[in-house]
């Protein structure tokens, strides 16, 4: 894990782009995963990523929980993006249909297995998808997820295990 606040201090002190690259390398895919979770589409992931990176670059305070803070930044940016750009869009494609067509979400920088895993997330309900993203992409503990989502740790654990079973079954059924 990055020494996030030390890196932020380097950025503040000298606009250190190499230090900022460390943050990018650690969190870019995670931010895009949150954007996908909220929007149900990959094509706006770079817009959300850019917005979050700008907010990180301009941030000037100590961050107690970097992963949690970045997750919230990404979720808020995606919700804002939706309200400003997609809320009234007649052709908005829901997450469930994205899962049906993995070719629609391919990007040059993604590997095939990442694309398949992320498309399989569409098989999960919204709460289960959020739990999986927090656990897999952000390495949250069950307790941290429970606190942020305001549900019991036991429920988080059980839903995560059930989500994994669903993902395994989807994988076996489709033989990605």
Image (cartoon, helix red, strand yellow):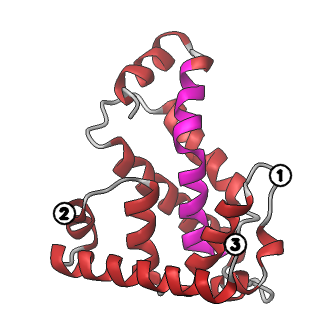
Residue 112 in the image: state x and y as whole percent: 74, 61
Residue 129, placed above or below residue 143: below
Question: Residue 65 vs residue 31: left or right?
Answer: left
The residue nearer to you, when weighing 69 against 175, is 175
Sooner in the amino-acid sequence: mark 3 or mark 1: 3
Residue denoted by label 3: 41
Residue denoted by label 1: 108
The quarter of the image holding the N terminus is top left
Disc 3 vs disc 2: which is toward the camera?
2
Which contiguous range is marked in magenta? 19-40
**Label 3, label 1: how far apart the Cα atoms are:** 16 Å
For the point 77% across and 48% down, which residue is it?
109
SS class, disc 1 = loop
Circle 3 packing at 10 Å, graded few (<14), some (14-19), many (20+), is: many
For the point 46% across and 76% down, which residue is it?
129
The answer to whether residue 83 shows anywhere in this view is no
Residue denoted by label 2: 143
Q: Which quadrant of the figure has residue 134?
A: bottom left
Residue 1: assigned label:
none
Residue 106 in the image: state x and y as whole percent: 80, 64
Question: Residue 102 vs residue 137: left or right?
Answer: right
């Amino acid at each position: 894990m990055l020494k996030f606040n030390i890196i932020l201090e380097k950025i503040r002190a000298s606009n250190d782009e190499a230090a900022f690259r460390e943050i990018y390398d650690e969190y870019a895919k995670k931010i895009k995963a949150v954007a996908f979770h909220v929007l149900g589409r990959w094509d706006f992931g770079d817009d959300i990523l850019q917005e979050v990176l700008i907010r990180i670059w301009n941030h000037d305070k100590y961050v107690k929980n970097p992963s949690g803070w970045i997750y919230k930044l990404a979720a808020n940016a995606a919700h804002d993006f939706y309200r400003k750009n997609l809320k009234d869009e007649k052709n908005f494609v829901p997450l469930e249909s994205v899962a049906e067509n993995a070719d629609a979400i391919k990007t040059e920088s993604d590997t095939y297995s990442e694309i398949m895993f992320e498309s399989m997330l569409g098989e999960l309900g919204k709460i289960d998808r959020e739990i999986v993203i927090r656990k897999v992409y952000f390495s949250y503990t069950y307790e941290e997820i429970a606190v942020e989502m305001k549900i019991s740790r036991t429920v988080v654990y059980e839903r995560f295990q059930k989500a994994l079973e669903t993902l395994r079954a989807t994988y076996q059924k489709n033989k990605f």
